[in-house]
Image: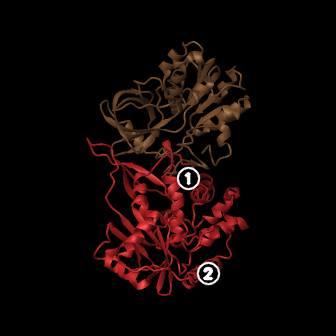
Amino acid sequence: MCEKNAFRTISATVTKLVEESPLIRTLRVEPEEEFVFHTGQFAELSVPNIGEGPFTPSSGQFDRDILEFTIMKAGFVTEHIHQLKVGDRIGLRGPFGTKYPIDEWYGKDVLILGGGVGLAPTRSLFLSLVHQIDKYKSITFLTGARTPGDMIYKDQVKEWNKIDKVNIISAVDKVPEGQEWDCEVCLITKLLDKVTIDPQESPAVVCGPPVMMKFGTIELLNHGFQESNIYLSMEKKMYCGHGQCRHCVMGKYYACKDGAVFTYDKIKNEENIWE
Amino acid sequence: MLVKVKDFEKFLDNCKTQMPRGIDAVIVPDKSLEDREFKYFVNIPDAKNIILNSYRTVEPIRMLFYLPRAQVFPYEKKNIKRLLVGVKGCDLRSLRLLDKALINDDFIDPDYKFWRDNTYIISTDCQELGESCHCTVLNGTPWAKHNFDINMTRVDDDFVLEVGSEKGQEILELLKEYMTITEAPVRIRELKDKKRLEMEAKVREQNKEFTIQNYKDLRKYASEKWKKESKDCVGCGACTNSCCSCYCIIVNDETREGEKFIKVRSTDSCQINGYARVAGGDSPRPHMYQRFRNRYLCKFDYMPSQFELMGCEGCGRCIDACPAEIDIRKVVRSLAEG
């Protein structure tokens, strides 16, 4: 039986802030004790006396001295996270949930689709894969956002694209007047036409807003990817993180403890997965 | 075993002024408002009219184990032993599901576990029927089969006692200090069984139009049907709050400046808009009929697949609590009948 108190919260200090877009910022935090996670797992972050919410680290699992979260201002708690300053403290609980099975992907071409703030968890995955790049055949990373101004990690993407065996293609839905963009202008799912890896064997990871998850999955299937190779990071309200609060129940599964990473074949018959 | 009703009542009367050895609180069903049907669990010094042999109380005993609000981190165990008297079969059946959900390999709710470990339960058979009682529809019985330490069935001037656990043995020893406990003659044991079957037949008679088959595979019904069934629902959440099986919570951070983190959980309801809202404000169930449907599917589809138990024991509290007079039995029947 589990003896650890799942509500146990440790303190972490904000050590660095990066404004990625008008609504998205990255926080680097230093926990008071080591916080080990596998890429794909999430943590509950709390702002003292305000509340808590589930967030997936955007830093790699092997970068033990760096813990980062990239967070969009989207509600009450995140509003307060966006007011935090360097030196402020937050609470950290977890990690919770399943991981991307990156050690099962050795020798394979890995495809990642990350859209909007969904790029945050895929950055963690990407950095974790790059850390042991010689174990993979290649990494194709498709990144998308509504406009160039919404695209996060722009400078990092340029650096990452220089890494051997890495191919990153970025697209925005549209380019408003006054913004500059030198990559593709289309929906992220359109970029799949440019991908040349063998769909039969390759794992494909999708993380983004629900509509992108849905059409990303449909397009991957159309391109010949296998249902059991499509990894979806489901966004549900994971209040407690450990299968108690029931807010994230999807039929017989809990997004928090049976996910948030699911393969498509596992959940395709469950209730309202795209909502 | 057998004990005189008047002896047991005298014991409870004593408890009002002097707690029994090793017990810090005795909690009983009480009907203080004489002209009302309602019974509530109260601490024994406040009890004016203890009702042991009728049907369930207004509030589920879930609320005594899984408090509407509890600090769960940091968690400090208290030093309290409680004795609950007059608990009903439906409530004790619901504890099977709560035990699986809240004390398992992945997770333990510290406060729920504390109260489960530190509460003695004396259950009593239902010998009166509530209008909404329908335990038999969900394969239950109007007496306890699970999770009691001692069960008592009233037969005329006696209670027939049954010990259900090791903790029950401890309570039996305690009771012996206050009353004479004798062997139950065969005649009285037979009367007990007869009384039970009579009561069960009454519940069945009251619910003869309803069958458990209707509760299965609710997923298949179109949204139009759910819209029709939920048209009177105002989404107040009285059904989930009065339910003996519902255990949804929210987690609040109540940390004070410069102090350690404090986590408090509070009851939540899936009927409230905003329950499943995610970042950015999107809700997977923005319409009332979707939230209404979720409650039924949770109880009769999701929970059975997660716990191999239904999330309803037929206690009927949601029927009594509903301001729109929505009856869970009629809803599932109506869905099935089209």
Q: Colour of chain B?
A: red
Which label lies toward us, 1 or 2? 2
Q: Which mark is residue B323?
A: none
B170 to the left or right of A187: left
Q: Which mark is residue B202?
A: 2
Q: What chain letter is assigned to the residue under label 2? A: B
Question: Where, by quadrant of the figure, is residue B63 drawn?
Answer: bottom left
Looking at the image, the residue that sits furthest to the bottom is B156
Say which amino acid is labelled 1.
Answer: Pro
| B193 versus A120 height, above or below | below
Q: Colour of chain A?
A: brown
**Secondary-structure class at tag 2:** helix
Q: What chain letter is assigned to the residue under label 1? A: B
Looking at the image, the residue that sits furthest to the left is B258
Which of the pair A89/A95 is nearer the observer?
A95
A252 to the left or right of B59: right
Question: Where, by quadrant of the figure, is residue B35 drawn?
Answer: bottom left
| A163 versus B191 height, above or below | above
